[in-house]
Image (cartoon, rainbow, N blue to C red):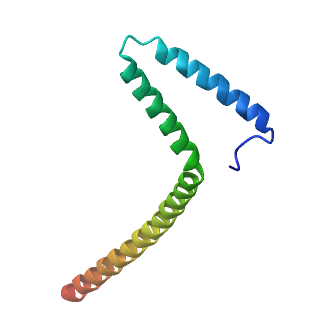
Amino acid sequence: MSNQTKNPVADQAVSVQLGFEMGVLISGLKVSDDVKEALLHKALQQAFLMEATKEVDEQYEQKLRELVKEFEQKNSEAEVEVERELNDIKNELKAKDNKILI
């Protein structure tokens, strides 16, 4: 992936260390071996999925930021238009009130 270091040996060493630490933590739990195996499997599966979808997640997050920006711009434009229309209505009402008084 694009976020990996340029040294695969260092990446592997970090992975081995993290795996060792996770194994130690799970082995210390007071649960059955089946539960330990399930926890380890789930942790590894989640770590793999997180890494495998990292780029897609980043693209999705960027697209959401763009959509929020676009929404805010359109919302701002709509507020300006509504205010303009309200001012036009107020001006028309004032003009009608002035005609009635004359």
Residue closest to the eye, 76 or 88:
76
Residue pictured at 53% horizontal, 61% vertical? 63
Of residue 63 and residue 74, the one placed in the foreground of this image is 63
Instruction: Name the outermost residue toward the right.
Output: 7
Q: Is residue 75 above or below residue 102?
A: above
Residue 35, position in %: x, y? 37, 22
The residue depicted at 68 percent of the width and 49 percent of the height is: 1
Residue 45, given in percent of the width and then of the height, sits at 48, 38
Residue furthest toward the front? 33
Q: Residue at x 57, y 52 (%)?
A: 58
* Image location of residue 18, percent across then percent down: 62, 25
Residue 78 picture quarter = bottom left
Residue 15 rendering spot, x and y as whole percentages:
66, 30
Answer left or right for 38 relative to 16: left
Q: Quadrant of the rendered structure where residue 39 is?
A: top left
Split into 4 quadrants, where in the image is the C terminus?
A: bottom left
Say left or right for 51 vs 79: right
Residue 19 placement, left or right of 9: left
Q: Residue at x 47, y 18 (%)?
A: 26
Please, is residue 48 above or below residue 18 in the view? below
From what the image shows, is residue 76 above or below residue 19?
below
